[in-house]
Image: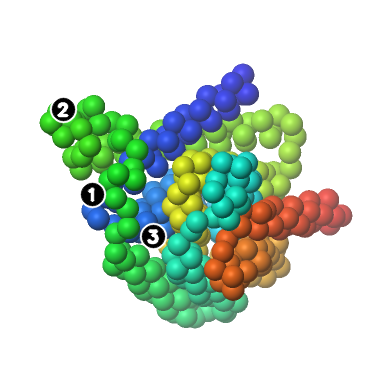
Amino acid sequence: MELIVLLVSFVIILIGAELFTNGIEWFGRKLELAEGAVGSVLAAVGTALPETMIPIVAIAFSQGGSRDEVGVGAILGAPFMLATLAMFVTGVAVLIQARQRPAGDVMPVDTDVLRTDMGAFGIAYAIAIAAAFLPSEPTWPKLVAAAALIVLYALYVKRHFEADPDVDAEDLAPLRFRKLDPAHRREPGTPRLRVVNLQVLAALGLIIVGAVAFVDSVERVATILGVDEVLLALVVAPIATELPEKFNSIIWVRQGKDTLAMGNITGAMVFQASIPTVVALVLAPAAWVAGPGTYIAFASAGMAFLSSAFIFIPMARSGKLHGKGLLIGGLFYIVYLAVVVIAILRPA
């Protein structure tokens, strides 16, 4: 029964992802936004919101320290999963499509967009992790760090939204909900913004419903199989919450829109390193501390930095991003998984 639920929720997520990628491209076109704004801001934030609510709710409505710890773990897990496993999955998608792509596994990305994203991520996450080494009292230095993260993310969004639009309507597939527009018969190629908005919201609804069902089913399967609760919290649950929404990137890879595919991931990394961390710094500053009991969780940040460096420094030097270069994210994920398993199995 659980396998059926997994399959059905998976199909719902795929349908939602297809509608979302199509709708968000038209949304960006109607607002005359560049690919960086569409992929790194609109798509990234839209698909990151469902899993972002988990740590925010855990911290904002916390009744005790354990719930704060769950929230902090979820905040740290998101950038790690995006920088490792999401990169790996996207790399695999590129290699599968390589024979049908003119440049093989070389991804035709806008490297300026990705440099902006990874530069913002590096600064934001460095501030966030550095704040974890500040003393618990007084709390005002952490509030300063939170303010810096808000300003940084605002400047990041401003830069993307000020870029010149680079997508023509002819480059887009027809809006899936176009027949719901009464004006479709008169102007079949130009859907109205209200219909575009309807498709985007419907797609997000499907992704959220599918993701919730998927996560619940994964947790039940893990319980049935007797998976350790710590392993579930640090590894299994982040896979279930982060990867489903990243099917958007796979769809864009298949369509040859690699800037959107990568921006969906790198933009989410900037968002996850900034906004959820602000919630922890403001509402649970005592929980955002690197020390005994949290070293393994904060070690995931180191893995996220290393994976990002190995993937994007070669791109910055050569001006090219290769699909096979993204596969190294899987290696860093396996290394961290091994660290977690050893920590769990080690005698107290």
The image shows residue 310 at horizontal and vertical percentages of 66, 66
Q: CA distance from mark 2 to mark 3?
A: 32 Å
Q: Secondary structure at mark 1?
A: helix
The residue that appears at 69% across and 33% down in the rendered structure is 223
- Earlier-in-chain disc, 2 versus 1: 1
Residue 139 numbered mark, or none: none
Residue at (82%, 54%) from the top-left corner?
A: 342
Residue 183 lies in quadrant: top left
Q: Is residue 23 above or below residue 290?
A: above
Q: Locate the N terminus by quadrant.
A: top right
What type is the residue that disc 1 sits on? Lys
Q: What is the spatial separation of the Cα atoms under label 3 and label 1, in whole angstroms? A: 15 Å
The kind of secondary structure element at disc 3 is helix
> Around disc 2, counting alpha carbons within 10 Å, would you say few (fewer than 14), some (14 to 19), or many (20 or more)?
few
Q: What residue do we see at 61% from left, 42% from top?
A: 99
Q: Is residue 119 left or right of residue 310?
A: left
* Marking on residue 36: 3
Q: Secondary structure at mark 2?
A: helix
| In the rendered image, the vertical position of residue 58 relative to residue 121, given as above or below | above
Measure the C-alpha gap from mark 2 to mark 1: 19 Å
Query: Residue 107, relative to residue 26: is it above or below?
Result: below
Residue 147: x and y in percent read 39, 74
Mark 3: which amino acid?
Gly
Q: Position of residue 294 (x, y in %)?
A: 67, 63
Task: Kindly identify the amino acid type of the residue bearing the numbered disc 2.
Answer: Arg
- Of residue 241 and residue 293, the one placed in the foreground of this image is 241
User: Quick one: label 3 or label 1, which is nearer the N terminus?
Assistant: 1
| Mark 2 touches mark 1? (CB < 8 Å) | no
Color style of the picture: rainbow
Circle 2 is placed at which residue position?
185
The answer to whether residue 73 is visible is no
